[in-house]
Image (cartoon, rainbow, N blue to C red):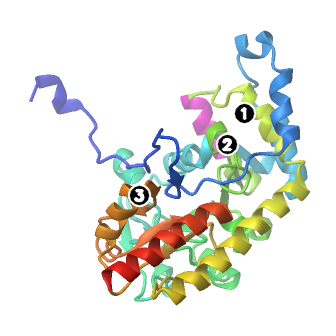
Amino acid sequence: MSPWEVNVRKAAPYVPGEQPGDKGIVKLNTNENPYQPPGEVLRQLETIDGDLLRRYPDPDMKLLVTALSRRYGVASEQVFVGVGSDDVLSMAFLAFFHGSRPVLFPDITYSFYDVWAEVYGIPYERIPVDGEFRVVKEDYFRENGGIVLANPNAPTGLSMPLEQIEEIVARNRESVVILDEAYVDFGGVSALPLIEKYDNLLVVQTFSKSRSMAGMRIGFAMGSKKLIGYLYSIRNSVNSYTMNPVSLRLGARITEEEQWFQDTCGRIIATRERVKKELKALGFVFPDSDANFIFASHPAYDAKKLFLALREAKIFVRYFEKPRISQYLRITVGTDRQMDQLLDFLKNYVRKES
């Protein structure tokens, strides 16, 4: 080890899903929306000129903040915008989790949470979900330095009822509770109405899933004015120019496309429910997902072998070689055609292996 390496901050990084460049791939591994953004949003690209690119973006991001404020019926001072929900969550960890007590989150959840805790030197504790992968609310009725819950959870897709979420928030008024609602538009119930009642609740969402804009990197949080003010003070201490002007413009425009938004979410939900039935008929088991993915296992087949066989057939799903979930595959809900390709492969696989 070189002498300077002693002072290097080290952490085991988050490992994102593959982004294969090959043509002909059935890509069901990163929970992207399979449908294009609406034409009105794409046409905004034609209005971009050199001045927009050569200047620094608006540090207050007013265009997008105002659009989100209008869309969700909250004050602009209650909206925080970041470069994807990962950036928003990272800033929230940095801003709110600064005590000696551990931050609590489930042992099976989005695997970036413990990475941020490690990077920022935040004590944390993974709380086991139950045998059906559900969060047990009573496990969070204890002293802590903060709570982070994905709802619907990832990679299981399971939702907690809103009344249970409120119980957790109400019993933890001395710490900040973060709800990561990346997948809420596919069947969950948002806790957004609770931010008017609880000043310690931060609700985080993203444009990457239901709004087909993962490449633009747009995330946002909503909470009390006090909570959002603290977030901006930390962000402005790190980087005042976080979001590029193209993302700001396209993000503001797509918040106006309500009918497209509802129709697209409806298509994905309908496909998900159809595929659930077909997977059950093939013998797969899975939690009842409210997200745009299905977390499936088959009692008769090893998940890693199935994952590799799918990959060989150019069908990419997500496999996590981790305790308790190593026999599950997370399958993004794609178009009906993509899901039919997946199902055709699985039918042949089951027939061949049985």
How much space separates mark 2 and mark 3, taking CA atoms? 33 Å
45 vs 50, nearest the viewer: 45
| Visible residue check, residue 325 | yes
Q: CA distance from mark 1 to mark 2?
A: 7 Å
For label 2, the residue is: 218
Q: Is residue 232 magenta?
A: yes
Residue linked to disc 3: 313
* Residue 5 left/right relative to 354: left
Q: Nearer the viewer, residue 40 or 82?
A: 40
Q: Label 1: which residue?
A: 247
Residue nearer the viewer, 345 or 308 = 345
Can residue 122 be seen in the rendering of this structure? no
Q: Secondary structure at mark 3?
A: loop
Q: Amino acid at mark 1?
A: Ser
What percent of the width, then of the height, locates residue 181? Answer: 64, 63
Q: CA distance from mark 3 to mark 1?
A: 35 Å
- Give the mark nearest the N terminus, 2 or 3: 2
Query: Against 251, is 343 above or below?
Result: below
Disc 2 and disc 3 in contact, CB within 8 angstroms: no
Residue at left 39%, top 82%? 351
Disc 1 to disc 2: CB gap under 8 Å: yes
Q: How many marks?
A: 3
Q: Residue at x 36, y 56 (%)?
A: 312
Tell me which segment is drawn in magenta.
Answer: 229-238
Q: Which quarter of the picture shows residue 301?
A: bottom left
Question: Does 326 lie within the magenta span?
Answer: no
